[in-house]
Amino acid sequence: MPTVTFISSDGKRTEVEAESGQTLLQIALDHNVDMEHACGGNGFCTTCMCKVKSGMENLSERNDREENMGVVDDPDRLSCQSQVLGNVEVEVIEY
Ligand code: FES
């Protein structure tokens, strides 16, 4: 099972185990990690954007919705569009 570590702006780390194929947003919400998701996880708002600290290679490839929203450069990813396939550490962006 992949391990996902969420890092909040105050440095708090939340480490959880996830099913392979779940999105970062699903995993965050399942574990009470505070992550915005104004469009409901449909890739139309960017409020779920996170910064990948390690394990970018363990996420699904960037998709069209991310590219359409201008999320095209590492380390930025849309959490609702990024499926976890292995261990990853992400910084949660707070608004
Ligand atoms: S929740 Fe809106 S883009 Fe991810």
Image: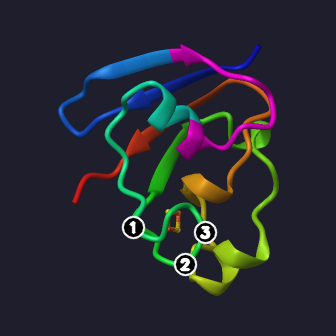
Magenta span of residues = 16-26
Mark 3 within 8 Å of ligand 1, using the beta carbon: yes
Which residue type carries mark 2?
Phe
Q: Is residue 26 left or right of residue 86?
A: left
Q: Are marks 3 and 2 in contact (CB under 8 Å)?
A: yes
Disc 1 crowd rating (10 Å Cα; few below 14, some 14-19, many 20+) is few
Where residue 89 sits: x, y (%)?
54, 30
Q: CA distance from mark 3 to mark 2?
A: 6 Å
Where residue 65 sits: x, y (%)?
69, 76
- Closest to the observer: 82 or 75? 82
> What quarter of the picture does the N terminus occupy?
top right
Q: Is residue 66 magenta?
A: no
* Residue 19 occupies quadrant: top right
Which residue type carries mark 3?
Asn
> What quarter of the picture does the C terminus occupy?
bottom left
Where residue 22 sits: x, y (%)?
72, 37
On the image, numbered disc 2 is attached to which residue? 44
Q: Is residue 73 left or right of residue 7?
A: right
* Residue 10 occupies quadrant: top left
Q: Is residue 9 above or below residue 2?
A: below
Mark 1 within 8 Å of ligand 1, using the beta carbon: yes
* Residue at the image position 39 percent from the left and 19 percent from the top: 14
* Residue at the image position 45 percent from the left and 24 percent from the top: 31
Q: Mark 3: which secondary structure?
A: loop
